[in-house]
Image (spheres, rainbow, N blue to C red):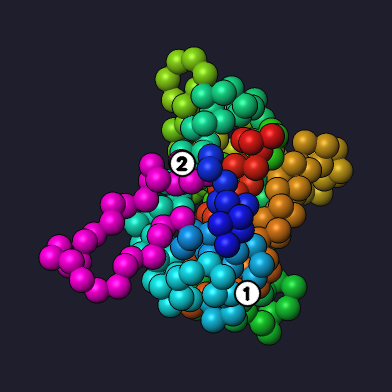
Amino acid sequence: MADLVERLVPDELWVLFRRVVPPTEVIRPQGGGRRRAGDREALAAIVFVATSGCTWRQLPPVFGPSWQTVYRRFAQWSRARVWARLHRVILDEHGARGELDWSRYAIDSVSLRAAKGPLTGPNPTDRGKLGSKIHLITDRNGLPLSLGISGANMHDSLGLEPLVRGIPPIRSRRGPRRRRPGKLHADKGYDYDHLRRWLRKRGIRHRIARKGIESSKRLGRHRWVVERTVSWLAGCRRLHRRYERKAEHFLAFAGIAAALICHRRLTK
């Protein structure tokens, strides 16, 4: 069991996670009761659920904590925004090493089937079925920097401003923290003048394909990195289809996937 936990939660990831996890509350200061399950074992079980796509009830008992305990820990950490903070801490490590390329960013989204819950809407490819959408901004190397979720019927252009605002201030190798890219690439779904004006006002150059004027193929020379990152997100099988009733839990799994992608690049 120890080998499995260390494989799912390497020492480097565990050190970073301990920096963002809330302190443990002692319910019985006088002692007694059952010993609290370890956070590392619970985190390994959550990563297993995220990557394997199994349900909470199908969680193997090899991790130690019961599936009910793991789910409660997941819900508690999701309310505390632990996954977003973990993602930001890992991005800070990349920034301190000078591994983030701020010269060119790319934005895109992906729709998936949703069984239930808020932030769902008619799927563009099949209006008779509900779906959700993951919106994403990556740097030039494809590292996910900002994530968001919405109903599948939300237009891509509505996600640009929240995603750009959602880029956290990230450490730099030298100088102050940074959060604005030099240039943003997008497809024709973002072809609106008010978005171009909004980006220019913030000192961000843009390269957005124009409808009916130019082909998206040339733009794809730079946008392919975000499409590759979308395929990396699919490595988190829990994101193949949305089963979470609560939107914050669906966003939590997207945040876990983004943190794992950034951490894998950090350890290369």
Seen in the picture, residue 171 relative to 109 is either above or below; the reply is above
Quote the CA–CA distance across marks 1 and 2: 26 Å
User: Element under label 2?
Assistant: helix
Quadrant placement of the C terminus: top right
Seen in the picture, residue 266 relative to 67 is either above or below; the reply is above
Q: Nearer the viewer, residue 200 or 124?
A: 124
Q: Which residue is mark 1?
A: 54
> In the figure, residue 213 lies in which quadrant?
top right
Q: Nearer the viewer, residue 115 or 12?
A: 12
Residue drawn at (76%, 48%), measured in percent from left and top? 228
For the residue marked with disc 1, what is the amino acid?
Answer: Cys
Seen in the picture, residue 201 relative to 110 is either above or below; the reply is above
Q: Name the mark on residue 66.
A: none
For the residue marked with disc 2, what is the amino acid?
Answer: Leu
Seen in the picture, residue 34 relative to 83 is either above or below; the reply is below
User: Element under label 1?
Assistant: loop
Q: Which residue is mark 2?
A: 16
The range drawn in magenta is 13-40
Q: Residues within 10 Å of mark 1 (few under 14, many from 20)?
A: some
Image position, residue 71 (x, y; %): 44, 72
